[in-house]
Each structure stands twice: as C-alpha cells, then as structure tokens.
Image (tube, helix red, strand yellow):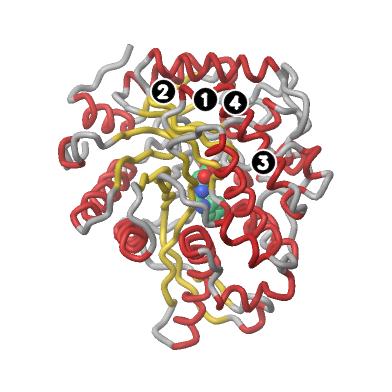
Amino acid sequence: MFSHKRADFGEDFLFGAATAAYQIEGGQTDGRGSSIWDTFSTTPGNVHNSETGKFACDHYNRWPEDLDLLADGGFDAYRFSFAWPRLIPEGVGQVNQKGVDFYDRLIDGMLERGLKPFATLYHWDLPSALQDKGGWLNRDIADWFADYAVMVHKNFGDRLETTATINEPWCVAFLSHMLGVHAPGYRDIRAAARASHHVLLAHGTAINALRAEGGKNLGIVCNFEVAQGATGKPEDMGAARLWDGIFNRWYLDGLFKGKYPSDVLAHFAPHMPDDFADDMAVVSTPIDWFGVNYYTRGLYEHAPERGAFPLRKVDGPLEKTAIGWEIFPEGLEEILTRISADYTDIPLYVTENGMAEIEGTDDPRRIAYYNGHLGAVLAAQKRGADVRGYFGWSLLDNYEWAEGYDKRFGLVHVDYKTQKRTPKSSYRAFQSLLTGANRSR
Ligand SMILES: OC[C@@H]1[C@@H](O)[C@H](O)[C@@H](O)c2nc(CNc3ccccc3)cn21
C-alpha cells in the first residue's frame, strides 16, 4: 500500500483517475463522425499491430460500471474527454443529439455517484472533416474550436467542475506534425510550427468565448518532461535546454508570459504564421487552473546530423516502465515547483501520472511508482506549489495510441475479449488510501 495518508495532501485535495474518449469509448455508432485517429490507425504502419479504437473498452455502453469503479475506489473526481466528432460529426454545424444524450447520461452518472466531472474538450480526436480543411494548419481552427467549446458549455457547463480546453498541445502539434508519431502523422517543420501556434491560439480563443458565456474554472493541460544532458558537455547540456524549450517552455512561456522562447523560435521562425506575435495576448488569456501531466525525464545529447533540431534522446540508466520511460519521481516535484515559482500561482492539478505494464502482470512496481510520485506532490506542496489534486493515468487499461493495447496503464485490467474489468493491486492501494478499506461492490 502507499506510505502516505489522505490527510497529508490537505483537506480539499482531490484524487481522481483519468481517461480519454478515443482510448476507451469505442461506440463508433449513433451518429459519431470520423476522427483523425480513425483514419491514422487504419493506415498501415502507424499503430502497433494496426490496432484501432473501434471497440476499445466499450465505455460507450459500459460507462455505469466504470463510474462504479471510480466511486468504489473512493475517488473524488473523474477526468474524461468529450469526443468532438461524437457531438459535432463534421466538426462545425450540425449537432448529433445522440452524442449529447450520451454525455448527459455520463455526467449525470458522475454527479449521482458524487464524482466531480473534470472535462477535457480536446484529447486528440479531431473530426476528419476539419482535417480535410487543414486541421491544426488552418488558422480557422481557432474559431471552429471556440464554437465547439461554447456548444459544450451550453449543454453541459452547469454540471462540470472544471473544463480544460486542450490535452497536451505539444502532442497535438510537435508529436503529430514534426515527429509524425500521432495523427495526422506529419513530419514537417512548417506544419509543426504552425500547429504549435494554432493550438494555443485555439485555446485562448476558446477561453475568451467561454468567458463570454459565463464559463468558470477554465484551464489547459500540458505535458512536461525533465530534460537533462546525457553528459555534462556543453553541447549535450545545450541539447537538453533546447528540448526543454520545445517540450516545456514553448507552452509555459506562451501561455503565461505571452511570448514564445527565442531559442525554439529561432528554429520555427521561417515557418511561423504571418503576424503570429499579434495573437500572443489571446494565447496568454488568463486561466483559472493549470493541468500538469508528468511521467518521466529524458536524457539528451547533441546530434548535428539531426537537421532542424540537432538533438537525440538517449537511453537512461534508471529503472523503466513497460513503455520504456525511466521512473523519476523527483522530476514531478521539480516541474511543479518550477511552474509555481517561475510562471503562475494559480492552482495546479496533476492531471496525469502513471505507469505502463505489459499484459496481466499487475506489476507490483506500480504501487511504488504511484507512492513515489505522490510523495513528489507532497514535497512540491511543502515548497509552495498550490497543488489541488492528482489524477492517476488511467482508470482502465485502454488504447495507448500508436502503441495499441499492449501497454497497459490501467488501475483496472481490461480483458478486451470479454470486456471484463478487474481491479489491480494499484487500484486497491488507492482504495485503501481514499477509503481506509479494500472493498468492491
Ligand atoms: O502514454 C500514456 C498517456 C496517454 O495514454 C494519454 O492519452 C496522454 O494524455 C499522455 N500523455 C503522456 C505524456 N506525453 C507523451 C509523450 C510521448 C508520447 C506520448 C505522450 C502520456 N500519456
């Protein structure tokens, strides 16, 4: 079990678990439109075993059972995402009433179980019809996204505890348009530069539109990595600094200082949209809270042959999870205290943290992983970071994007043949922390 007590985190601290629509819902029916992940995952070579989210965890039908798991675990909150194509199949225009009905039932189900709904508007499943118009490369996406955000607010806003605009703008832009690992799978610095700006412009435009409708408790969720030099050589330390700029500071500086970091801009500048600097007031529109997703650190070395960004991640010596990420809980303390000290004093939530394991292992290391990162939250709080909550990734084993289904992050095991849910020992550890007992319905 964990070595911490619930009271250690503060009386109003919230514990939750997190998921995302495309990774758990399945339910490609009832008027749901196509998303870029439907097309990306069915394009050979993009996803392990060519696995798709077509069925996933069948959460579209099994959501009551999944909400029961959250309630039985003693969790206070549930971080989930709306599927844009399920609500507005073409991305703009016509609303799919069956999609509205699904999320109405889901959110009411949370409230009936005493679970606070922490909603994410966009967790990577862009409607294909918008990709056909250029997707994140088209500046108009800021208005498309803001209109979608207002639609969600009008239908569900009165029942949401918090609303995050975007999950991990780095993944939406750089991972998906420079590295090509995620949908739409571009490997193009010009696409990456423009997406890296438009994703934040869309965020700020949506925040302003939601404020105009009375929206409250609005934020964004970014992913962070502690970037360290593979050696103490200046060129490797420089590589780590540049990666810190690409992964961390582009978003922190843009969102909280209204200015992109000059070291990254030096690489992006020839490809940035015209007059992007005029958008920075919108990009940095004030928000009410900030979500921090943290998993690991990275070691980087100078790699002059790598062209635009002359760096390379190198394998580190620390114990790794099944997805190959080093276990480095100190990094969560570092990230939380850095954001709090250098960027903002608004409330922070750890919106994702967790460990992948392979099939059926119920890896005993996972309890130690969570215990260590919960300890990092406590240490950051002691150093002044206003951390208000922690969400484990993920409630369920689910579709791990380009990795398919093998990499299992769930607190609850899912047998995809039968869709049987089985709590793992890490679920029981949270249940004990949160309720003082191990129990299930
Ligand atoms: O990979 C685990 C989770 C993923 O399932 C979530 O949908 C996503 O929000 C998420 N973000 C990270 C951290 N960022 C990241 C880094 C490299 C590749 C993919 C994600 C991990 N995860």
The circle drawn on residue 145 is 3
Q: Eyeballing the image, is 327 above or below 141? A: below
Q: Earlier in the sequence, mark 4 or mark 1?
A: 4
Q: Quadrant of residue 58?
A: top right
Front position among marks 4 and 3: 3
What is the CA distance from the residue labelled 3 to the residue labelled 1?
35 Å
What is the CA distance from the residue labelled 4 to the residue labelled 1?
15 Å
Q: Earlier in the sequence, mark 2 or mark 4?
A: 4
Give the amino acid type for the residue marked by disc 3 in the picture. Phe
Look at 33% across and 56% down and name the residue there.
336
Look at 66% across and 32% down and name the residue there.
84
Q: Earlier in the sequence, mark 3 or mark 1?
A: 3
Give the amino acid type for the residue marked by disc 4 in the picture. Glu
Q: Earlier in the sequence, mark 2 or mark 1?
A: 1
Q: Earlier in the sequence, mark 4 or mark 3?
A: 4
Disc 2 and disc 1 in contact, CB within 8 angstroms: yes
Residue 387 x/y as whole percent: 29, 47
The residue at which mark 2 appears reads as 422
Q: In the image, is 218 to the left or to the right of 4?
A: right
Residue 230 x/y as whole percent: 44, 77
The residue at which mark 1 appears reads as 415
Disc 4 and disc 3 in contact, CB within 8 angstroms: no
- Tell me the crowding category of disc 3: few under 14, some 14 to 19, or many 20 or more residues within 10 angstroms, Cα based: many
Of 282 and 196, the residue lying toward us: 282
Q: In the image, is 297 to the left or to the right of 55?
A: left
Give the amino acid type for the residue marked by disc 2 in the picture. Thr
- Tell me the crowding category of disc 4: few under 14, some 14 to 19, or many 20 or more residues within 10 angstroms, Cα based: many
Secondary structure beneath dot 3 equals helix
The circle drawn on residue 25 is 4
Give the amino acid type for the residue marked by disc 1 in the picture. Asp
Q: Quadrant of residue 114?
A: top left
